[in-house]
Image (spheres, rainbow, N blue to C red):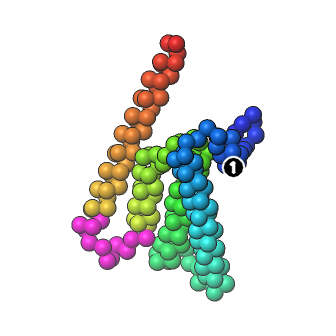
Amino acid sequence: MKQNGRKTNMFTETRKHWPVMTFYERFEQMIAIILSFAIAVVVVVALWELLVRIGGLLIAGTLDPLDHRGFQNIFGMIMTLLIAMEFKHSIIRVIDRHENIIQVKTVLLIAMLALARKFIIIDAATIGADKLAALAAVILALGAVYWLVRESDQRQRLNQQKQQGQE
């Protein structure tokens, strides 16, 4: 969060708002901070594992970007990291007091990222057409719901701006 052109950290914002928070808001804030640190640890460990795996493949001379199985494994790990970082970002927004709770759009985005990861690592030879069609239908449905929620948010913001302009 920026304040007077400077970036502040989550603890500054928490300390600033702590006196006016209700008991539950304080509880929610503490849980969000603990979750943020836990996810950060998971991200660091996953990144380390990714780097060790890629380093091992480079040292062994077996890293072949055209190898389908290796590509799937490496990109699956990268997508897992991206999903975890997006999840952490949504929690930090709660800590920075931008949002009160995790937003529906964020949950939908994370679900779509998880499905995109699934499509990357999927082995087409072992999955049936029915399961592939079901996954495609789910991602289309999530995309449609995401679009509807985004449109609703934009209309709501526009209405608020109009009301503020009339005052």
Q: Position of residue 117 (x, y in %)?
A: 45, 64
Q: Does the image show residue 60?
A: yes
Left or right: 27 as drawn, with respect to 10:
left
- Residue at x 51%, y 77% (from the top left corner): 70
* 60 versus 156 height, above or below: below
- Residue at x 43%, y 61% (from the top left corner): 114
Q: Position of residue 31 (x, y in %)?
A: 55, 56
Q: Which residue has dot 1 on it?
A: 11
**Nearer to me, 104 or 137:** 104
* 35 versus 7 height, above or below: below
**Nearer to me, 17 or 104:** 17
Left or right: 128 as drawn, with respect to 66:
left
Q: Position of residue 122 (x, y in %)?
A: 39, 71
Farthest residue, direction bottom: 60
- Residue at x 58%, y 68% (from the top left corner): 42
Amino acid under disc 1: Phe
* 43 versus 158 height, above or below: below
Farthest residue, direction front: 23
Instruction: Determine whether the residue tagged by mark 1 lies in a helix, strand or loop.
Output: helix
Farthest residue, direction top: 166
Say whether residue 98 is magenta: no
Q: Does the image show residue 54?
A: no
**Nearer to me, 139 or 28:** 28
- For disc 1, the neighbor class at 10 Å (few under 14, some 14 to 19, many from 20) is few
Magenta region, residue range: 121-132
Give the number of marks. Answer: 1
Q: Position of residue 5 (x, y in %)?
A: 75, 36
Quarter placement of the N terminus: top right
